[in-house]
Structures are given as structure tokens and as C-alpha cells.
Image: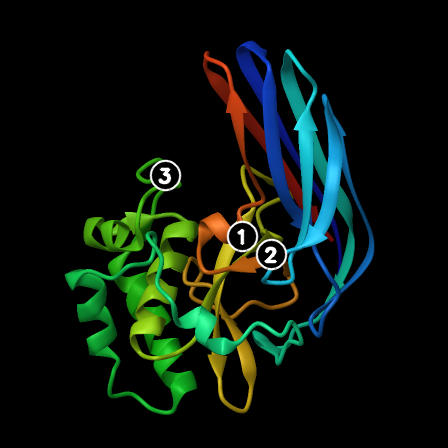
Amino acid sequence: MLLKISHTSTYRYDTKVPYALQRLKLTPQSNSTQMVHDWTVTCTGAQREVTYRDGYDNMVELIRQERNSVEISITAEGTVTTANTNGVIGHDKTGTPLWVYGRQTGLTTPGETIRKLADSVAGISPRLSQLHELMTKIVAQMAYEGGQTDVETTGEAALAAGRGVCQDLTHVFVSAARLLDIPARYVSGYLMMLDGPDQAASHAWAEAYVEGLGWVGFDAANDICPDDKYVRVAVGLDYRDAAPISGIRRGSGGETLEVAVKVEQ
């Protein structure tokens, strides 16, 4: 499937900002499930400082906001051909050892609720069936509901509350998978929705490592393995590692963010 994607984030500030640095992870790469034909990231009100690959092999750009500006706009857009592999990504060649993806973080540290979830599927085999059952149980225990969590909400807190968005369901999945001694990682990217091209945000799902298959995707927000409607952009241990945009700024005053995402065939 040939997908056309446009993702614009516009930051507006109440007062002039003397200094701000943003880290962008907005560039997808070609792999066994997708072929990137063209992709550009443009910035208004900021200058590109450096481009590099991080420890997870994500493409990263650092941009510096123009001094004393009150607005910055970042647009990522391009076209990608995708294939349906039933969620199987395979073995990657990043050189990152699997044990790295067994480490919990502040956002994925399990508590009693996630431990109980992991215990409920502990006896299931093979691994692939176990992971599918884990995803199904998360869907049964959590309602997809926006406005109830934020970027600092832990997977444990979201599962205990029984609600959250794709970020939260993904944190729960990777936390429980790691408890089961399965390497798991957080994935950020895009999903073409069937109800129209316009969206309020990008998407997130998980990948787990299965012997013989390699990395396999699991989207607990939709209870499916990613197909040709998905485009992978960045991976990491949690949201903070794979966030499309993150950064720091100096100065007082409030900040508003407007995001517009369009994914269409």
C-alpha cells in the first residue's frame, strides 16, 4: 500500500523564548515492512544543528529555535510503500543486544496490577500465543480513552485506572512482556485510520522478540498485529526514547501545541 503522510507540530509561546532545543525522531527508515520513497522534515522558526543515529538506530535531528521567537512549526511529510507481514518485522541489524530491551524504565516499571496481568498468561505456550493472549487481556482490562493520562503516566497507573491511550497500552504491554523474560520495545509511527485521513496525533504500539521470527508487532490499542496501514518511525524502551518531538527551553510563560496528522492512501 502506498501511503502519503503529513505531520505538523506548531508550538506557540506566551512570551519570547530566549533558547529552545528540540530533538526530532520523525524520519522513518526502509525495512522488511516498508519502503520510504521520499521524506522531508522542515522547520519554521528554528535551525537544524545536527543529524545522527541514536543507540536504537533511530534517525535523530536536533534543531535550535531562533532566539526570542514566539512560534515554531515542524512538518514531516513523505510517501511510504508498506507490506502486510502479519506484524513480523524479523531480525534487525542495529547491533543493539536483546538484553537492552529487557530493562524496565520509570514508565514501564511494573507494580501489583501489571504483575498480576503477566502471571495470568505465564503458563501459555508457545511464545507467540502467549503474546497474543497478553494483548487481548490488556484490551479487555483497559478502555481507550483520551484526556485521562499524559506523557508522565506510568503503565502501572494506566492499567490500575483501566483507561488510557495507545502510549499507555503500549507501556503496559512492554512491561508485562519483560516480566515474562521477553525482550520488548516501544514503537512510534503512523496508522492510516479507516474513518478518514485527519488525526490528532501519531500512533504507538509494541514489538516483542520471538525466537525464530524475530521482532513481531502488537498494537494493544486495536488488538491486532500491525499490517500495511502502519508506518514505523522510531523505537526505544518507552515513550521518552521514541517520542516524535522532545526538548528543553528557557524562559517563563505558557506553551500551547497544535498537532495535525494526515495519513492517506
Residue at 57% of width from left, 47% of height from top?
195
Q: Vertically, is 265 above or below 200?
A: below
How many numbered marks are there?
A: 3
**Relative image position of residue 104 (x, y in whole percent):** 35, 63
Near mark 3 (Cα within 10 A), the count class, few <14, some 14-19 or many ≥20, is few
Scheme of colours in the image: rainbow
Q: Which residue is mark 2?
A: 234
Q: Secondary structure at mark 3?
A: loop
Q: Do the numbered discs 1 and 2 sit on residues whose CB atoms are within 8 Å? A: yes
> Who is closer to the viewer here, 220 or 156?
156
Q: Which residue is mark 1?
A: 242
Residue at 55% of width from left, 60% of height from top?
235
> Which of marks 2 and 1 precedes in the sequence?
2
Residue 80 visible from this viewpoint? yes
Q: Secondary structure at mark 1?
A: helix
**Relative image position of residue 246 (x, y in whole percent):** 54, 38
Please give the label number shown on residue 233.
none
Residue at 40% of width from left, 72% of height from top?
102
Near mark 1 (Cα within 10 A), the count class, few <14, some 14-19 or many ≥20, is many
> Who is closer to the viewer here, 98 or 3?
98
As drawn, which residue projects farthest toward the right?
Answer: 37
Between circles 3 and 1, the one closer to the viewer is: 1
Please give the label number shown on residue 150.
3
Near mark 2 (Cα within 10 A), the count class, few <14, some 14-19 or many ≥20, is many
Quadrant containing the N terminus is bottom right
Asked which quadrant contains residue 77, the reply is top right
Q: Amino acid at mark 2?
A: Ala
Q: Amino acid at mark 3?
A: Asp
Q: Do the numbered discs 3 and 1 sit on residues whose CB atoms are within 8 Å? A: no
